[in-house]
Image (cartoon, grey):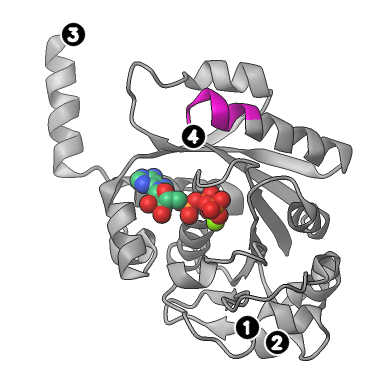
């Protein structure tokens, strides 16, 4: 059983996309038992990525001690278990620091609990880090995202939590993007996967189904499968597609 927190400091870089697809990949490809938790408690959207829009029981009621954690866990048709936060607006700030205590109550039922962190480095993010055994950082290959991610990394270090690595998301391979080596050098964090910019991800979010579940062979899905394999230490041998074979053949001919 491992609790993994997904954080970035900068908003919109892909934390929820990583959480929903990585959870789905661990279940779909490796048969793991996974609970995905919305740690973005005040502005949640993990449930939306899984097509859940109107849940009566949520993490918010759990944190208020109104219901048991198990009462707010839903089983998605894919097999991923989801603990969503409330989409209703309220001015009362939830007791986010109870997150660890609540997750600890159910974590033994799972191989992995993956917490989708909030943006910034406020109390919700601290609660996510405190509830986690390991942290996955997410960044885009640009200076603003990288500088924020380094800030998040420092907080993780101060809190003495194990840093698993960095997922670079929305990688297009354009000239103006920061290079992988430069990002690793600046942040001193190992990049464990590079998710390409993939329009299919945007489409899958609009369909409210993680891309890994919609199309397991899409480029981005294959990277999520590799990351899931590394995390669960399963051997991953990718079957070569016909296009991969043609590209390899053309490359060989150039030499
Ligand atoms: N690999 C990708 N390729 C193309 N678009 C992407 C990719 N990853 C994410 N996106 C787009 O970026 C948007 C933001 O992603 P996401 O919601 O996962 O970020 P976030 O870090 O969770 O944001 P927040 O900080 O608001 O919680 C998505 O709605 C999607 O449109
Ligand atoms: Mg998010």
In the rendering, at what x and y percent does residue 127 appear?
80, 58
In the rendering, at what x and y percent does residue 3 appear?
72, 60
* Residues in magenta, as a range: 140-147
Q: CA distance from mark 1 to mark 4?
A: 31 Å
Against 18, residue 195 (above or below) is: above
Residue that carries the numbered disc 1 in the rendered image: 73
Image-based side of 174 in relation to 151, left or right: left
- What crowding class fits label 1: few (fewer than 14 Cα within 10 Å), some (14-19), or many (20 or more)? some
Identify the disc placed on residue 199.
Answer: none
Which tag, 4 or 2, sits closer to the chain's start?
2
Residue that carries the numbered disc 3 in the rendered image: 255
Q: CA distance from mark 2 to mark 1?
A: 5 Å
Residue 51 forms part of the magenta stretch: no
Q: CA distance from mark 2 to mark 3?
A: 59 Å
Of circles 3 and 1, which is in front? Answer: 1
Residue that carries the numbered disc 4 in the rendered image: 140
Residue that carries the numbered disc 2 in the rendered image: 70
Q: Residue at x 46, y 46 (%)?
A: 226
Q: CA distance from mark 4 to mark 2?
A: 35 Å
Of residues 86 and 153, the one drawn nearer to the viewer in this rendering: 86
Q: Residue at x 46, y 71 (%)?
A: 48
- What crowding class fits label 2: few (fewer than 14 Cα within 10 Å), some (14-19), or many (20 or more)? some
Q: Quadrant of the N terminus?
A: bottom right
- What crowding class fits label 4: few (fewer than 14 Cα within 10 Å), some (14-19), or many (20 or more)? many
In the rendering, at what x and y percent does residue 88 appear?
59, 79
In the rendering, at what x and y percent does residue 145 appear?
56, 32
Residue 238 found in image quarter: top left
**Dot 1 lies on which element?**
loop
């Amino acid at each position: 059983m491992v609790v993994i927190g997904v954080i970035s400091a900068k908003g919109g870089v892909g934390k929820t996309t990583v959480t929903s697809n990585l959870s789905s990949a661990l279940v779909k490809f490796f048969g793991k038992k996974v609970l995905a938790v919305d740690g973005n408690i005040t502005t949640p959207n993990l449930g939306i990525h899984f097509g859940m829009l109107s849940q009566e029981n949520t993490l918010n009621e759990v944190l208020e001690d109104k219901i048991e954690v198990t009462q707010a866990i839903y089983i998605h048709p894919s097999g991923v278990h989801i603990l969503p936060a409330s989409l209703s607006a309220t001015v009362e700030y939830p007791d986010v620091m109870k997150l660890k205590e609540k997750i600890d109550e159910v974590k033994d039922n799972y191989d992995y609990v993956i917490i989708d962190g909030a943006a910034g480095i406020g109390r919700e993010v601290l609660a996510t880090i405190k509830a986690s055994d390991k942290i996955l950082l997410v960044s885009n290959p640009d200076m603003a995202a990288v500088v924020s991610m380094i800030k998040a990394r420092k907080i993780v270090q101060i809190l003495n939590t194990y840093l698993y690595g960095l997922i670079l998301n929305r990688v297009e391979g354009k000239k103006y993007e920061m290079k992988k080596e430069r990002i690793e050098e600046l942040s001193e964090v190992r990049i464990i996967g590079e998710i390409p910019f993939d329009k299919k991800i945007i489409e899958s979010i609009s369909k409210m189904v993680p891309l890994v579940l919609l199309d397991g062979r899409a480029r981005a899905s294959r990277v999520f499968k590799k990351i899931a394999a590394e995390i669960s230490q399963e051997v991953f041998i990718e079957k070569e597609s016909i296009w991969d074979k043609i590209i390899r053949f053309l490359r060989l001919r150039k030499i």
